[in-house]
Image: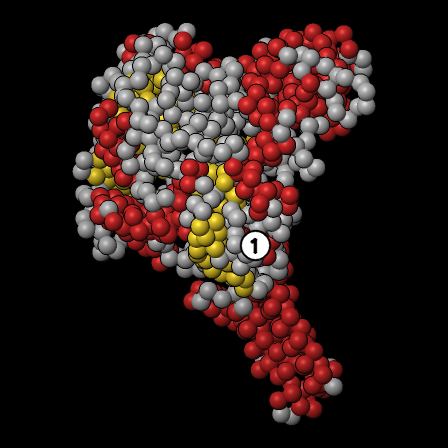
Amino acid sequence: MIATLVCLLVMWVWHLLTPYWWGVMLFPFAYGAGLAKTGGKAIRTGLLSAGILWLGASLYFYFSGSGIIASRMAGMFGLGRPGLMIAATALVAAVAAGLSGYAGYAVGVLFRKPAKRTDTEERS
Amino acid sequence: MRWIRAIVTLLFVAAAFWALDNRHGTFPALGRLLDPFTGFWQNGERSDAVPGNLVLPGLRAEVRIAWDDRHVPHIFAANEHDLFLTQGYVAAALRLWQMDFQSLYTAGRIAEVVGPAALRQDIFTRRFGLPWAAANTVRALRDDAETKEALEAFSAGVNARIADLGRKGLPVEFKILDYRPEPWTDYKSALLLKAMAYALTAFNQDAAMTRMRDRGGAWSEAVSSLFPDFAPLVDPVIPPGTPLDFTPVAVPAPPVAGTPSAGAAARTGVASTDAACDAPAPQGPFGPPGLLARPELGSNNWAVSGRLTKDGFPILCNDMHLELSFPAVWYEVQLSAPGMNVRGVSFPAAPLVVAGYNADIAWGFTNGTDDVLDWYAIEFKDGTHAEYRQAGAWRKASVREETFKVRGGRTFVDRVVITHHGPIVRWPDEPAFAAMDVRAGAALRWLGHDVSNEFTTLRALSRARNYGDYVAALENWSCPGQNFIFAGREGTIALWHNGRFPLRWKGQGRFVMDGADPANEWQGWIPHAQIPHVRDPERGFVSSANQAPVDESYPYYLGWDYASFERGARINEILRAARAVTPEDMVRMQTDVLDIRARAVLPRLLEIIGPRATSDAERRCLEELRAWNLEVRAGAVAPTVFNELWSELNRLTWDDETTDETGRMPRPASQVMIDQVLGHPAAAWFDDKRTDGAVETLDGIAADAFRSAVANLEKRLGPFGEAWHWGKAKGTVIRHLARIPAFGRKVEADGTGHVIDAISAVWAPSWRMVVELGPEVRAWGNYPGGQSGNPGSRFYEDRVEDWAAGRPYELVFLKSADEPHPRVVGRTVMRGRR
């Protein structure tokens, strides 16, 4: 939970300081590679942190003036309702971050010492 | 195993990153677009509040902007430099993507943004020479110190706005199409001039007319009888009987040989390889330059003398018809600096006001529609196209290399061959262009290629105080030729059919001409004082609706392919009967929908089809037509039926006539068709060439047309019912420039292209304006769209419903920046530094 929160906050700061969307892939990857104890946790942390961040942000913008543009974008994507743009935003971030977290974990375990203990933990 | 897992998952992540970070065909880069911190979510507008203070580098003094409740900026500056700097900034704040996209389109660079699908259109644009013309023009613009300063300041303002935008501030279309705006330059403003010149003067039927003439016999005769220089029913712009106030100059002599261009065509072999098409309805996938002003799609303007108005003040009215689009073609602005306080509409891509008024005068436009575009058949010495025949000798052609950087595709280089006439637009071994019926191998001569500075006219009109200033302002205007309408507070009304017009021999340019014969070339210009004009005519009004400007008494040939008679005749009919006119009357008149085409021809058609209606649907349609009050209302069925009947009558009459194996004959104008229906019911044109032995006349064709029309409507709209209402059947749609469906909208509105309220499917009044020039000028106006180009703004389309219903807004016109006004809702102060 703490990892999710920290990851979310770091990504938030990243978004405020840089124009690059792929912070939501970078930090879950880094967390998965360096800190996640299991692949499942890496996925969950990425998925939740990025999903919640983009969900919360899009909800905030939706209710503070972006309703019209969300409706038009929903129309452009054939989604019909603007609420689905919020869902799509959260989903894209969550899936990309979850996948990235797991990839980070899969790469990280190659370099961890002792590798064996990590494997055991993963099985448990 | 772990290595394999790591590699596989990394590949997945890389694929996901690639998929989300790149555009795929027309599908946007989702990661960047959905990012709530920089993507489309940032394109909402949190409130209608305008910024209180802004820093605009380069300002020499403080600039104040008052914003009215329609989001119109009223800009007050201490000098013109600051005025245009601020206008550039404000235009970009409202419409940056539109400006950038239109400039790319006119520069023939749209494939850089949308990919290979747009390459053919880009090739046409570059061959036709729009960017070349703009590059030539911008040099002339820089030669005039005031224009240079205005354009440079305007560009600096646009660039200041671009600099203010990070990725998240970019208009949403940049994010969807995934590119960034380029720095603005005076060249891009010049491109706008050429885009308008193209849209308003490039429509031509020269290739089709040449095919008809070259076929000989009855076809040659039909060119003059069906496509005459002076058509029946047309009430010309300059009132017949207006005395000439000049002594005409001599007109050049036509070539001595019979039909030299036919001979040249035979020599070059271009006619046989010209895969002709019947002047296709020009259309492009994006943007205005793809859509040409066909003569029947035009504009209206009129000015009424104080003698005919209730309060004794002149009233000027103008509605300019262009392709409906989001963002809207125009935006409203008031510009004030010492010596200038002008209000009206402008194109976002250029400084100044294009059509509008100040405290003393008002002016507006309709397209002149004259022939300023000719084609010359060229005989090249050999396949290298290095030399061509001219005046009995071989002359060297030049070559311009055009490079196309196609997004997601190869870089492509096209060699444009240029003669002294102009460029070769299409070669015999090339397919036709969707944008224009181009005679293969012919060289283009187009007035828009000539150097000119139309900005000086607009600047002078902004400052004009009286009729003399107005006439002086017009002299520099070259292309597109326009019916400049004028009314002054002093009481004068006037109309100059203004532009640069080649001094032609009669009929010159109607056909593709022999490029080797100098007698076919333009050999001078009609002196400006001798172009068609009228001031304070006896009838008390001046008007135009793109119809022929003059009758046969005018000494010069200007062209033949003008708008059909209806709008012009209807305007004059109303104004001839008008007394004690009020601005409210004029507002209503701008949405007049009486169909005088139907009035002329429907009684005769009803006589024919009345006894022949058999099916239930045919009888109901007949009842609708009989009960019709001739008003083209959205809620009526009769206009739908009449429109389809007219279309089928024309199709069955003309489309069986072919000029050669591949080309159909162009359809004559409506007044010619009406003349045939009423005066020549047994004309050979009504005979269906596809029926062996039988000889059809009007009666048979009209009955067939009615049956076919009703069948078409049933097939297209379903059973007779609400879907047949004109507003629905017409299908008016305002499309987004990039054709993003959810960024456009449908509109149900009265009107059609040939009534005064000319709202057709995609072409409509782009700005309606009524100005009363009393001691305090008052004006009303509206346009289809909104001030903002941002689809996420409530000002994107807030005017559409009122526009469709013909409800204009009274225009706020301030005397000073700080003038209290109940409709001013915000004020911005701009300074050069903090």
User: At 38% across and 15% down in the image, what residue appears?
Assistant: B239
- The answer to which of B89 and B330 lies nearer the viewer is B330
Q: Residues within 10 Å of mark 1 (few under 14, many from 20)?
A: many
- The answer to which of B778 and B183 lies nearer the viewer is B183
Give the position of the N terminus of chain B as an image quadrant: bottom right
Chain identity of mark 1: B
User: At 31% across and 10% down in the image, what residue appears?
Assistant: B538
Q: Residue A100: in sight, yes or no? A: yes
Q: Which residue is mark 1?
A: B119
Q: Position of residue B492 (x, y in %)?
A: 26, 18
Q: Position of residue A38 (x, y in %)?
A: 67, 79
- The answer to which of B407 and B95 lies nearer the viewer is B407
Q: Position of residue B88 (x, y in %)?
A: 32, 47
- The answer to which of B308 and A71 lies nearer the viewer is B308
The answer to whether residue B139 is left or right of residue B29 is left
Amino acid tagged 1? Leu
Above/below status of B207 relative to B671: below
Task: Looking at this view, name the residue that lies furthest to the bottom.
Answer: A114
Above/below status of B317 relative to B518: above
The colour scheme used to paint the residues is secondary structure
Q: What secondary structure is marked by label 1?
A: helix
Q: Position of residue B322 (x, y in %)?
A: 48, 33
User: At 51% across and 47% down in the image, what residue appears?
Assistant: B378
Q: Residue B598: in sight, yes or no? A: no
User: At 69% across and 86% down in the image, what residue appears?
Assistant: B3
